[in-house]
Amino acid sequence: YFKMYCFWTQASRAKLTEVEKKFFHHALTISDPDNRNPIPNFTQTIVGSLGTIKIEDKSENSHKKPAMVLVHGYASSNSFWSLVIRALAPHFRLYLVELHGHGRSDRTPEFPSNLSALEAEDYMAEYIEKWRKESDLGDEKFFLVGHSLGAMVSWRYAAKYEHRLRHLILLSPVGVPTQPPNLEERLANAPLFFRFLISRWKSGTSPMDIIRSFGPFGMTIVRSAVRRRMKWMPAHSAFHKVDFEAFCEIIHQSWALPANGERAMNAMLVPGAYAKEPLLGRAQQDLYGPQIPHPSLPISLIYGDPEFDWMTPSHGKTFADILSSRTGSKYVGFQEVPGAGHLVCFDNPTGFVELLMKEVRSAGTL
């Protein structure tokens, strides 16, 4: 059955590994046109069931650099971080880690059905802890950077394992605001096509299922979807410089492999990308409860430009203000990357790195 499945979808982890390597070599070359930083080597592995890219550091002071773990968002992969590696590598030992069931990560065991939102968060966060245990970090505290859905999973990880972390950085996180009171009414009155998509979301279907069902024609759909998404990106976005075909092939291979961790989105979010258990709501209900990391853990929220980032940075600013009001709060920072949309590291990688470095220095964690 698996051989027939791979024949129909034309997907395999071996193909994904190969095209990912090609994409990264190109991205690392173009990401620093002034050659201010050397092009680092990297290794592609599976650690704790999760697809991992470790940036190799052979410098004499590598042991003095703190570790930074970067976790991408929904339907994405380690490729999201490709344009910021050269700028971050001189300061950190970098580990790019894929969410369970995304990218090169294992697709077994099957994602449990009927999980609550918090149970789904726990399920995904525990794979991050499994990764840590099987990595070479040992007991070292590390920087954890999560984007979008990866930020929401990182938040859950921090709430359970804040003693493992040096600094939590949430990049354009999904799931912050509470649901608008008229959301159900708006969804019910949406156009017919969108109501169909909403019904599929509620039934557990994902965009990846569409790609799988189209088999050998899936790559054509991915190309079209990526081109359409590029039209929403700022004209100056650095994404326009990446290897388009290799990127589309990464998306196709990742999406066409068997379903798994992608199902977490259906459990954690409602249509419209609002969280079933919004982070802002949790903070307002109990600032010192088990759903919130300890006040002693430095936290930074970094969004894109309010003009482009559909995650609405103003919600993040409200969230940051509430967190910073806690007794004993060590550091809570908030930044907006100019000219960047939700895909911050593709739109303005230089701006992102500058503000991240500003945050870790302001917090005193570097």
Image: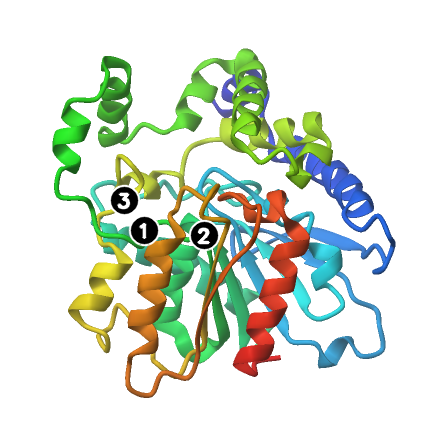
Three-letter amino acid code at the position of disc 3: Tyr
Residue of label 2? 172
Q: Is residue 21 left or right of residue 258?
A: right
Q: Earlier in the sequence, mark 1 or mark 3?
A: 1
Q: Is residue 210 left or right of residue 188?
A: right
Three-letter amino acid code at the position of disc 2: Ser
108 over 185 or under it: above or below: below
Which mark, by number, is residue 24? Answer: none
Which residue does the image show at 50% across and 50% down from the upper left? 304
Residue of label 3? 274
9 over 314 or under it: above or below: above
Report how many numbered discs are placed on residues in the image. 3
Residue 30 coordinates in the image, percent (x, y): 80, 43
Which residue does the image show at 27% across and 29% down from the upper left? 201
Tags 2 and 3 in contact by the CB under 8 Å rule? no
How many angstroms separate mark 1 from mark 2 (CA)?
10 Å
Residue 190 coordinates in the image, percent (x, y): 21, 22
How many angstroms separate mark 1 from mark 3 (CA)?
5 Å
Q: Is residue 129 left or right of residue 240?
A: left
